[in-house]
Image: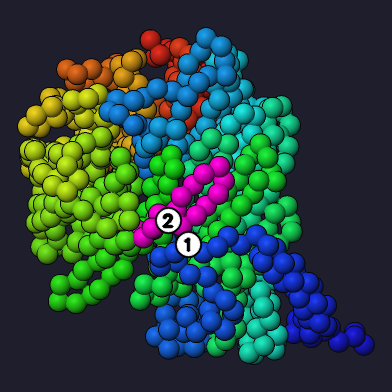
Amino acid sequence: MEPKRPTLGENFERVAPALTVVMLLIGLVAVVYLETNRPVAPTGNLRYFSSETEMARYLNSADGGDSNNLFGAQAGGGPEVAGGDRLVTMGDTTPPPSTAPGEGFSGTNVQVAGVDEGDIVKTDGNAIYVASGGDVVLLDARPAADMAVMSRIELDTWTSELYIAEGRLIVVTHGFPYYMLGGGVGIARGSPVCESCDVMFNYYPYETNVRVYDVTDLTAPAMVQNITLPGWFAGSRMIGDWTYILTTEYVYYEDDDVILPAVAVDGVRTPLQPRDIGYFDDGTYATTILTVAAVNAQDPGGFNHESFLVGGVQTVYVSLTDLYVTSPTYVWGERSTTTTWIFRLGLAAGTIAYEADGQVPGWVLNQFSIDEYEGHLRIATTDGWGDDAANNVYVLDEDLAVQGRIENLAPGERIFSARFVGERGYIVTFRQIDPLFVLDLSDPAAPVVLGELEIPGVSTYLHPFDATHLIGVGSVSCEDPMSAWLNCVKISLFDVAGTPRLVSEYVIRAAGGSNSEAQYDHKAFLFDRAKELLVIPVQTWSWTPVISDPARGEAWTEYYYSGWSGAFVFEATTAGFTLRGNVSHADENTSAPDTWYYGPSVRRSLYIGDDLYTISDRLVKANRLDTLAEVASVDL
């Protein structure tokens, strides 16, 4: 007779006492660390919990008195994937210094000069690092004719972003590890014992991993640090040697038992304690933990992190000295309204410190709706929906109190793109036509609208060309310019020296339409004013007739929806855009019996020296910058 196999609950009961002892030891170490290292809480709204009981009381108040929220705390919403581009003054497109003498190369298109942004493709001027599926591929890119894959880092979770600096590759991934709770005793990632958990259930927390590799030898990348942060990946930036990573995690609790997540460094998990978590004593309640971690790729011992309770993270904006996160609060009623909370954290060589918080009406589109300039924060919002929508721009002082405002721009429309550059601001709203508003923000207390331009279509990304010109990337109808069906890519050049005017535009027309990742992700946009170079990825589609049975002639003609994938390369000057040519990664299907044909999409482009590299999901291709003649290609 086969012995009775212990149940999962029985196994858990056997190990629970030992686990409890381990947890008490870990908790003791954490408290000792806390008492000796916790900085004094800043004045203002920020407070820290003194105990688990105090935190549970707060969470129950936040949840409207519902004391059983174990299966899902009030969520603040998932993080918005923010984008940005590189500038301090208009037209600043200087690439980072090259590690290859005599060769320049393009970096990631970022919002603030000196603040790098993670991306799926990075280069140091010699190698190209590509996030391909869940893995990272390392290519030796120089010379272009000898480009080759040197190694591949295989990972067990999905890759979000990469950074490269001084022989170190930072890889940010995310996924679902597996944990169990229940059987009368429950433990989650080193949390306090949940004695009231009386039901066995599966618990799948989401975690973000930060892995640092030494890539001085491209053939043998070596991991030098492995960090696990709790929750969803919400954004990141790199300033100098420090990479700042943001994650959000819902707080799970039942009655007075709060289940807190842990931070792990090289496999050693340290649970957060209530005293580690700051909250804002402003009359509102939040149940999402925002963790901001600082990682030094050159010095693993410099790792640091701070956690705060917020209502969720919608948008992340980072200057050279400050990190801003926005958290929206929605009020539904006869006229729905939104309030956006803004939290500012000071950043300095790996330290993270709360500085101020404030609020403005409306919700924020993305990071380009926010900008810090000479001690002031400028922010563009849309308040309300549909016919009740109103668009606003606010100027906030160092305490994040509103100092100046422009309200009720383009009633009934919403913001589709925004950009702040020095003392100017640019806002695009849309419902059927594209109004571009130019704002004078030189007086923070009295911002004004300088001019407005209305043209068909809409610009979803704005990029400075020089001090008096602005590039817009967006959409327009290929059939009827006044139609709201925006099915083709459009790039526009605006003169914004005075009253805004359209200088030039280029529409990428195709029978079935066209689109570009640069329409919604600025990192797909490559622009170099000195080289008069503009490159964007493009996909086009069309209905293609195919005679499926040649013996029966045209009576058996079918139509297949096929597409072309590649990159469009333009010469960009103050006179407009001239198409120099394109780089194809997938030619249009005209014969294969595949009803829905999609080739690999070009995701990014970059240049090193005199070569242009385009990267799709399956391919890296090198072409000459001057002639666009193909030099080499590598299959990923």
Which residue is tagged 1?
42
Task: Compare residues 609 and 390 and report the one nearer the observer.
Answer: 390
Q: Residues within 10 Å of mark 1 (few under 14, many from 20)?
A: few
Residue 549 position in % (x across, y down): 35, 38
Q: Quadrant of residue 606?
A: top left
Label 1: state its secondary structure.
loop
Q: Is residue 349 magenta?
A: yes
Taken as a whole, is the magenta stretch helix, strand or loop? strand
From this view, report whether residue 282 is shown above or below residue 478.
below
Q: Distance from label 2 to label 1 (Cα)?
A: 8 Å
**Image quadrant containing the N terminus:** bottom right
Q: Which residues are magenta?
A: 342-357
Q: Quadrant of residue 451?
A: top left
Describe residue 454's horizontal placement relative to residue 510 as left or right.
left
Which residue is tagged 2?
355
Label 2: state its secondary structure.
strand
Task: Compare residues 599 and 138 and report the one nearer the observer.
Answer: 138
Residue 180 position in % (x across, y down): 67, 75
Q: Amino acid at mark 2?
A: Glu
Residue 564 position in % (x across, y down): 35, 32
Task: Compare residues 86 and 585 and report the one nearer the observer.
Answer: 86
Task: Say which mark, if any, is on residue 97.
Answer: none
Q: Residues within 10 Å of mark 2 (few under 14, many from 20)?
A: many
Q: Is residue 35 magenta?
A: no
CB under 8 Å between discs 2 and 1:
yes
Whether residue 19 is visible: no
Whether residue 241 is visible: yes
Q: Amino acid at mark 1?
A: Pro
Q: Residue at x 77, y 79 (%)?
A: 20
From this view, report whether residue 269 is shown above or below residue 163.
below
